[in-house]
Amino acid sequence: MIIAKYLYVYLGFFLAFVGSIGNLLTFSVFVRRKKYRSLSSSTFLAGSTFGEQLVLLSSAFPDSLTYALDYDFYGISIEMCKSTSFLYFAGGVVALTCMYLAAIERYLQTCRSSSQREWMTLNRARLLVFLTTLVSSAISIPFALYRNVTSNNQSCEYVNANFKRMAPLMYAIVGVPMPITLLSVFGFLTWRNLKTPTQRQRTGLATHKLNNQVVRMILIQTSIVVLSILPASLLQAYFLITDKNSQGTTALDHFILCITQLLLYVHSCASLYVYVVVSRTFRHQVQVMLCLKRRRSTRVLPFTEKTRPTRNQTIVW
């Protein structure tokens, strides 16, 4: 238990801090940089990053503080209890749904039919993200409504017995089979389309470096989501089969549960670092935002004696 506690405190804070910085930069690149603003998939990735950050703020930080202080940080106030419950579920649903939409959009872009490739417009993508946010917020209201600070031990718990039984089932459905199934299926379909030479020629992705990089970004990120969720789902299935509660009964159960919970935060923290490794364009845009590299412009200067332009003159600004 002591090992699990310190592991959760240090790794939890580290993942939350590093992930928050990464999510902020990732969201800024997708929203502010011209190269990505025109892509529908960037809209979905920005929405997913926003949802992941809500998860970190409402779960990773409070969980780490709870382990560090030996006190239920969620129970410090009714507002904290209800808001974190609402934001955690809403943020998770937004993040996963936007990732589904990004995977579907990339699949459509690799399809043979031109009508399928042109279906996902930028305005339609923005509308889908907006609707996703509304629906996610609506279905998350009960998590805030039926959760409160108990008077006996000042902890944040479900106060409605029926919803207390339903909540784990909702988490299980939304957080385990849906992302594993949908992301795996559309990731495989996209990968299969890209393996077909004639398909790449029809879609134009073979010659469009930015689109190719976005496809790789989504495929690898979806793989990380599946791999980070799978251990927790297998552990909960084990607890269910062996008639143990969701927190386990032995010290080993608690330790393994701690590891799987930390793994759940990996996909909420990894987006920036995955995209930087996979995409050269994204890496360049991050460097520009951090002022580590200046953009180059190919504007033509009027000829004067002072300028004396060379064959490929550029201006750094």
Image (tube, rainbow, N blue to C red):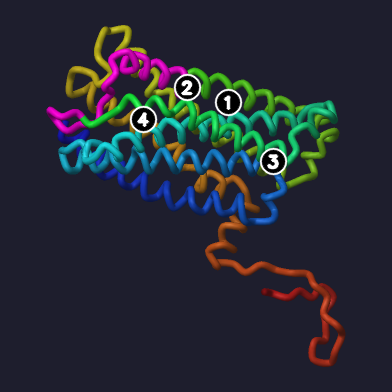
Residue extending farthest left: 152
Q: Out of 50 and 280, give the one closest to the viewer.
A: 50
Give residue 220's position: percent from left, percent from top. Answer: 57, 35
Q: Out of 133 and 258, give the one closest to the viewer.
A: 133
Crowd band around label 1 with a 10 angstrom C-alpha radius: few (<14), some (14–19), many (20+): many
Give the CA separation, mark 3 to mark 2.
24 Å
Mark 4 belongs to which amino acid? Ala
Crowd band around label 4 with a 10 angstrom C-alpha radius: few (<14), some (14–19), many (20+): many
Give residue 141's position: percent from left, percent from top. Answer: 42, 28
Q: Which mark is first along the chain, 4 or 2?
A: 4
Q: What stretch is highlighted in magenta?
A: 150-175
Q: Which mark is first along the chain, 1 or 3?
A: 3
Mark 1 belongs to which amino acid? Leu
SS for callout 1: helix
Give residue 98's position: percent from left, percent from top. Answer: 58, 34
- Residue at the spot of label 2: 174
Picture disc at residue 183: 1
Q: Indicate whether 214 appears above or below 225.
A: below
Q: Indicate whether 23 appears above or below 110.
A: below
Front label number (3 vs 1): 3
SS for callout 2: helix
Crowd band around label 3 with a 10 angstrom C-alpha radius: few (<14), some (14–19), many (20+): many
Mark 3 belongs to which amino acid? Ser
Front label number (2 vs 4): 4
- Residue at the spot of label 3: 40
